[in-house]
Amino acid sequence: MGPDTVNGMAVLLLIDVQQNMLEPPKPVPDAAAVAPTIERLLAGARAQGAAVVHIRNNGTDDDPDVPGTPGWELVHPPRPDEEIVDKHEPDAFEGTRLAEILAEPTTVVVAGMQSEFCIRATSLAATHRGHRVQLVRGAHATYDDTVEELPARTISHEVEQELRAAGVELVDPAEVAFA
């Protein structure tokens, strides 16, 4: 991909939109609302000819997203012209080729899982690398925090506020324009 194929359009980063997060047996609590929003974003990006990068987490040991397992599989099969970036850290730039794919500053539209981990880390890293980052409301989610007794929606909202303070734009799905 790189600057020749981005062509001044926003890039859709789908972070960890994997079976283990959106499908039984343990989907995120907002899976039923988040999944169709992500699907519409992906359809919009494809229809407008925008670049799409699928970020896939590679779990270890007993994680539900160990490479090769059903939970590791992407929910939306990538098209041949779409990049897949496999990662091992919350920041999708760390130890991957994402920085090469997004070599020039561009607008990055972010959606996926989990708000307080990979969404947060990748959005902050993209901002620090000079990208304009748009986090789509209702297109990212997480699990309830049973230790702190925080519901998933509260966690996602708090992450949105933190990211907005760091320079990330919060946009509604209807506001996203890839061209």
Image: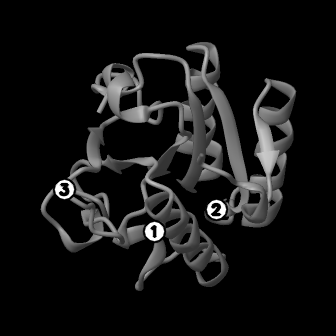
Q: Amino acid at mark 1?
A: Met
Q: Judge depth for marks 3 and 1 and give the one in front.
A: 3
Query: What is the x, y in percent for residue 63?
Result: 31, 58
Query: In the rendered image, which residue does mark 3 sit on?
Result: 80
Residue drawn at point x = 76 percent, y = 65 percent: 174
Question: Within the image, what quadrant is residue 72 found in?
Answer: bottom left
Pointers 1 and 2 in contact (C-beta within 8 Å): yes
Question: Within the image, what quadrant is residue 106 found in?
Answer: top right
Give the left or right position of residue 152, taking residue 110 as reference. right
Query: In the rendered image, which residue does mark 1 sit on?
Result: 21
Q: Amino acid at mark 2?
A: Ala
Q: Secondary structure at mark 2?
A: strand
Frontmost residue, 136 versus 5:
5
Q: CA distance from mark 2 to mark 3?
A: 27 Å
Query: What is the x, y in percent for residue 130?
Result: 61, 14
Q: Amino acid at mark 3?
A: Pro
Residue neighbourhood size for the residue with mark 2, other residues' Cα within 10 Å, grouped as few (<14), some (14–19), many (≥20): many
Q: Secondary structure at mark 3?
A: loop
Q: Is residue 108 above or below residue 23?
A: above
Q: How is the image coloured?
A: one colour
Pointers 3 and 1 in contact (C-beta within 8 Å): no
Q: Is residue 106 above or below residue 40?
A: above
Residue drawn at point x = 75 percent, y = 32 percent: 168
Query: In the rendered image, which residue does mark 2 sit on?
Result: 141
Q: Earlier in the sequence, mark 1 or mark 2?
A: 1
